């Protein structure tokens, strides 16, 4: 009997790799083997495939059946191999016309009665198919709209393997999926928490506006109840809407991680991830036996909020140093090295001391100097150096809580943020840089030139607080963002002075 051939895909990291499925049916004992480095899920698919074919269409051949997944040196994972393997067996046993599957990429999980279930990572599979020059996909019905987002692909859907059997034998053609995505789906979020709900804390609001405009990392310090978490949850409401390319990246990551519905077309809002301080290193950065995206990748193009910052183990926090610097995570295993994107805004919150009331006027701190330094030492110097803005938030007075007027709405703040972001996009139009926080040292020297008075101020600050070269560049990047918010072509002394005030922990630790 001739060998049947079709194509499917497996997910490795956040990308899909095209896999050829070869099936051979020959005379022999009733044996069904799948070779080519399948994982346990694929090995178990033999029972699902046999039952699905016997219960729905045709029959599973009582012959020696061998299915090869090529290339054989790539580990294959997932339940999406059920459907292509079943169809390849039907073709190899002459129940389907010879060669009918060659031009398709097919994915889907089978139920015992032949129903086709959706799978994770369909957008990554669609993008990989387009890159490989494959024109037609056959996917589960629920996955159809998400796969149809990819331009240039014909996406056919089916809810039962019988529909596919009839498609290839009786010309009962499958329906084609159409994306229902509208341009308005990538507009500003409508259900965000509004900045106007937060009374007082005007300096912290100003700092978050600057952080949103330049994509700077922020650490909020203040006593319990000062509004750190309340403000942090409102940061996504002032960020610009995702571009279509950013939305594709984010959707691909979340689809592979299984954090959204398999039928979800596109993630249209920036992520706000807030892991608990008991999370593991693999949970935060990514990893596992088959490496999966962690919180830093799920927060890609969004916000990673770490509340109670010093409660995270220091070894876990130091894992953030590479993602913050390189905007990507590299996970190496004996057989493979994978990269996960991690371009996010780090927003952290902490108390000033273990009891939480150091410097508070309303309640006396009971911590010793040693315990305060031990508490703060949980955040290493190299990590703190990568946080551009460190903001103090004092406790609110009774008058502020009850009589303070409402501040600006998130919409008003977002308009200024958008104007500053557009200024940056124009500035970096011919480079790979997009935001002020991502500037290289050479770009800092080019776009962050100071007046004589500014040089004198920055030099005195660096000497007094013994700041590093990275902190020097960080202050200039923040000053550049402040100038962009005012639509100022140059950095003035007051822009630099404001940027310096956002290094409060550096000042306190070097008294």
Image (cartoon, rainbow, N blue to C red):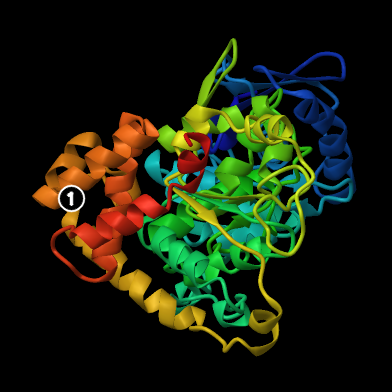
Count of labels in the image: 1
Q: Is residue 26 left or right of residue 391?
A: right
Residue 13 drawn above or below residue 68? below
- The quadrant of the picture occupied by the N terminus is top right
Q: Residue at x 38, y 42 (%)?
A: 131
Q: Residue at x 53, y 44 (%)?
A: 125
Is residue 455 among the parts visible in the rendering? yes
Q: Which quarter of the picture shows residue 231?
A: bottom right
- Camera-side residue: 35 or 468? 468
Residue that sits furthest to the top in the current view: 334
Q: Residues within 10 Å of mark 1 (few under 14, many from 20)?
A: some
**Where in the figure is residue 245, as x and y percent of width and height?**
39, 57
Q: Residue at x 66, y 65 (%)?
A: 395
- Camera-side residue: 190 or 80? 190
Residue 378 drawn above or below residue 215? above
Q: Is residue 364 left or right of residue 428?
A: right
**Where in the figure is residue 238, as x and y percent of width and height?**
47, 71
Is residue 18 among the parts visible in the rendering? no
Question: Residue under circle 1?
Answer: 454
Residue 19 drawn above or below residue 210? above
**Where in the figure is residue 466, as x and y percent of width and height?**
37, 30
- Camera-side residue: 232 or 138? 232
**Where in the figure is residue 437, as x and y percent of width and height?**
34, 48
- Helix, strand or loop at label 1? It is helix
Q: Which quarter of the picture shows residue 83?
A: top right
């Amino acid at each position: 009997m001739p060998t049947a051939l079709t194509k499917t895909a497996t997910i490795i990291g956040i990308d899909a790799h095209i896999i050829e499925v070869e099936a051979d049916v020959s005379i022999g004992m009733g044996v069904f083997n799948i070779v080519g480095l399948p994982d346990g899920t694929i090995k178990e698919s033999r029972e699902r495939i046999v039952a699905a074919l016997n219960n729905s269409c045709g029959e599973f051949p009582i012959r020696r059946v061998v299915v090869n997944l090529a290339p054989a040196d790539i580990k294959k994972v997932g339940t999406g191999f059920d459907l292509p393997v079943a169809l390849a067996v039907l073709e190899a046993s002459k129940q389907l016309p010879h060669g009918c599957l060659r031009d398709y990429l097919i994915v889907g999980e089978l139920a015992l009665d032949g129903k086709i279930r959706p799978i994770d990572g369909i957008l990554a599979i669609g993008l990989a198919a387009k890159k490989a020059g494959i024109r037609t996909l056959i996917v589960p019905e629920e996955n159809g709209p998400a796969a149809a987002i990819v331009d240039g692909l014909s996406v056919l859907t089916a809810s039962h393997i019988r529909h596919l059997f009839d498609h290839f034998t009786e010309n009962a053609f499958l329906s084609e999926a159409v994306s229902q995505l509208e341009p308005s789906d990538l507009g500003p979020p409508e259900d965000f928490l509004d900045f106007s709900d937060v009374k007082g804390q005007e300096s912290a609001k100003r700092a978050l506006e600057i952080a949103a405009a330049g994509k700077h990392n922020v650490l909020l310090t203040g006593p319990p109840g000062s509004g750190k978490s309340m403000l942090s949850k409102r940061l996504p409401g002032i960020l610009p809407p995702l571009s279509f390319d950013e939305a594709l990246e984010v959707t691909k990551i979340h689809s592979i991680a299984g954090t959204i519905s398999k039928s979800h077309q596109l993630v249209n809002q920036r992520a706000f991830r807030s892991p608990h301080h008991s999370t593991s290193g693999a949970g935060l950065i990514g990893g596992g036996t088959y490496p999966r995206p962690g919180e830093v990748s799920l927060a890609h193009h969004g916000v990673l909020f770490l509340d109670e910052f010093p409660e995270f183990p220091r070894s876990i926090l130091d894992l953030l140093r590479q993602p913050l610097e390189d905007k990507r995570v590299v996970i190496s295993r004996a057989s493979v090295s994978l990269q996960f994107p991690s371009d996010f805004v780090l927003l952290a919150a902490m108390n000033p001391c273990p009891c939480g009331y150091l410097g508070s006027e309303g309640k006396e701190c009971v911590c010793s100097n040693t315990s305060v330094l031990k508490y703060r030492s949980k955040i290493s110097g190299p990590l703190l150096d990568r946080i551009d803005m460190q903001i103090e938030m004092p406790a609110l007075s009774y008058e502020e809580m009850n009589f303070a007027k409402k501040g600006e709405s998130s919409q008003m703040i977002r308009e200024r943020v958008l104007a500053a972001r557009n200024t940056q996009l124009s500035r970096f139009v011919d480079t790979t840089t997009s935001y002020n926080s991502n500037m290289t040292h050479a770009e800092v020297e080019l776009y962050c030139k100071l007046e004589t008075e500014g040089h004198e101020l920055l030099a005195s600050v660096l000497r007094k607080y013994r700041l590093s070269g990275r902190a020097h560049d960080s202050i200039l990047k923040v000053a550049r963002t402040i100038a962009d918010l005012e639509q100022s072509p140059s950095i003035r002394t007051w822009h630099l002075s404001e940027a310096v005030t956002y290094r409060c922990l550096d000042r306190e630790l070097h008294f």
